[in-house]
Structure formats: C-alpha cells, structure tokens
Image (cartoon, rainbow, N blue to C red):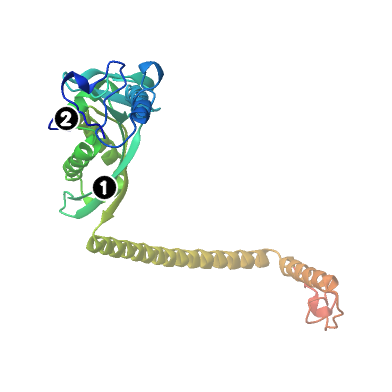
Amino acid sequence: VSTQSTGISGFPEGSQAMNNNNKGPKLPFPIKQEDFDKFFKGKGGKPSGFFGRFGIGFGILASAALLYNSVYTVPAGHRAVIFHRIWGVLPNTSGEGTHVRIPWFEKIELYNTRVQPREFNSATGTKDLQMIVVHLRILSKPNAKLLPTIHRFIGPDYREKVLPSLANEVLKNVVAQFNAAQLLTEREQVSQLVKKRLKARATDFHIELEDVAITEITFSKEYTTAIEAKQIAQQETERAKFVVEKARQDKLQTIVQAEGESQAARLISEATQQNPYFIELRRIEAARQIAHSISASSGKVLLNSDSLLINLLSPGASVTRPTK
C-alpha cells in the first residue's frame, strides 16, 4: 500500500492525485496500478476498456431509439391525428404510409376511416301504446377532413359516445308516430324516415352514415298472442265464407242440372211424338255402345241378347208406323 499522505476520502491530496504521464488515479487499495490503467484507458490515452465500450454502446442505443421514435407508419384505411405538446392538436392529418415526427413533442393517434357496422337495440313505444324492441344496423365512418375536430371535442371512442344515444333518440321519435300494425305493413317507410333523421343528427358530430336499416322488430308476448288469435279468427271467417259460397254454388248446380234434365225430357217427349223412329235410333246407339265395350274386352262374355238390346230384328223391336 502506498505510504503517501492521503486526505479524508483516502485518495492522494492536491495535484498529486493525477500523475504527469496521464495514467489515471492511483488506488489506495491493493490493486496493481498498471492493471487499473489498462482497464480505464487504452493505448494513446483513448478509452477502450469497459467504461469506454459502455459509452459507445449507450450512444448507439440512444441513437436507434431516437430514430425509431422519429418515424411512424399509418396503415391502410387509417389517418393519423397529431397532438403537439406545445401547439395542441394540429389541423392537418397524415395519410397512409411512413412519416416523420418529433419525438416526445408529437403524439400520434390513429383513426380508422373505413365503413364499420354497428347494431343497436332500442325498447320504445308505438302510437297505440305497444312496447316493442327495434333492432337497428348502422354503417358509419368519420369525416376524414374533420378528424382533428373529432379528436379535440369527442375523442377516439366517438362511436361509443355518439351513435347509441342518437339511435335511441331517433328511434323513439319515429316509432311513436306509427301503430304497431303499421310498423309491419309500412316497414320500408319507417326505415327510410329513421335513416333520414339519423343522418341529419350524425352530421352535427362529423360522422357519415352509409346505410341505416331496421333488421328486426320484436313485439311483446301479449301482442304477439293477440295477433295470432286475430289471424286465426280471420282464417275461420274466410273458411266459413268459403263453405257458404260452396253450398250456394252446389244449390245453383243442382237447380241448373234439374232444369237441364227437365228440358231434356221435354225435348225427348216432343221428339218421340213427332218422330216415332227416335226411340229406335236410341236403341241402335245403345246396342252399338254395348257391342263396342264387349269387343274391346280381353275375356269372353256370354250374355242374353235380349238384355243387351241387340235383338234389334225381333218382332218386339220393330216400330209400327202410324197409319194415316
């Protein structure tokens, strides 16, 4: 151990702390001075030991971190809003691609400018005081030119803050103008009215609506039961009307058929009185039909000719001509 006088801290006092040949401080504890000089300084007085290498590595890492934080990328379908720690939200936005920023001073917030769907359920009352649940589907996107305004006054979660309240408000106002039955029969008109009013309200918050549609209307259980009972009663009424109309048509058919048979009998009677050969003509036609049926049969049939009206030449079959 060196016997040189030391101060309170244990290191050499005054100008003797560093020697003239720039070999670094001398140690008061048992380590060779040459080893410490090699560790602290390299050849020519340049730092090449642990501390020198640590300084170089730290500088490289700091430069890489600075470069990394100076560049940001905006993906497809997005725009970037820049918040400056001094100037606040900047009026211009950045489009797709890679851009440069000032680290720490500028904070980047990405906004999705694509059309995104959102569904809402709203329980509301109709004009005839029926409670229903309307299911609404909205396709929306932000106004890309006014993204800084949206970021300043609403925030990145503007859809969750604005659209639910707007949809609930517009649905209650529109549905209250229609009866429950009109919501089914005039559904397209109701949907168009909701779309028109909702677009007008969303414009105040710089939100663009691409499409608004009513996907489903759910009625209460009691109203659904009443509708089913009404439909059953209407079907029963229509069935009763059909039965009555069928009976009336059957009656008319019977009357017409009876009138036809009566008229046919009268015509046959008149024809028989005017021409006695009319009955003989009918006998011949009947015999021909019977003979045709028997000839077309594949089996053999043995019948009495008298029963088949084929005895056309029998004495009883002849017709006596009237005498003058």
Between residues 83 and 252, which one lies in front from this camera angle?
83
> Is 99 left or right of 318, judged from the image as shown?
left
Name the image quarter holding the N terminus: top left
N-terminal-most mark, 1 or 2:
2
Give residue 5's position: percent from left, percent from top. Answer: 17, 29
What kind of element bears circle 2?
loop
Residue type at mark 1: give it: Leu
Q: For residue 73, what is the image quadrant?
A: top left
Q: Is residue 62 above or below residue 219?
A: above
Q: Is residue 5 above or below residue 92?
A: below
Q: Is residue 82 visible?
A: yes
| Residue closest to the eye, 117 or 246 | 117
| 324 relative to 104 in the view: left or right | right
**Amino acid beneath label 2:** Thr
Residue in view at x 26 percent, y 31 percent: 27
Specify the label residue 192 is tagged with.
none
> Of helix, strand and loop, which one carries label 1?
helix
**Few, some or many C-alpha atoms within 10 Å of disc 1 (few <14, some 14-19, many ≥20)?**
some
Give the quadrant of the C terminus: bottom right
Query: Where 198 sits versus 99, above or below?
Result: below
Residue tagged by mark 2? 6
Q: Which mark is residue 183?
A: 1
> Does residue 105 appear in the picture of this structure?
no
Residue 280, image quadrant: bottom right
Residue 193 location, x and y as percent? 24, 36
Q: Nearer the viewer, residue 206 or 316?
A: 206
Can you give x and y, in whole percent of width and height, for residue 133 in the image?
Answer: 24, 52
Task: Tell me whether circle 1 and circle 2 mark residues in contact (CB < 8 Å).
Answer: no
Within 10 Å of disc 2 (Cα), the crowding (few <14, some 14-19, many 20+) is some
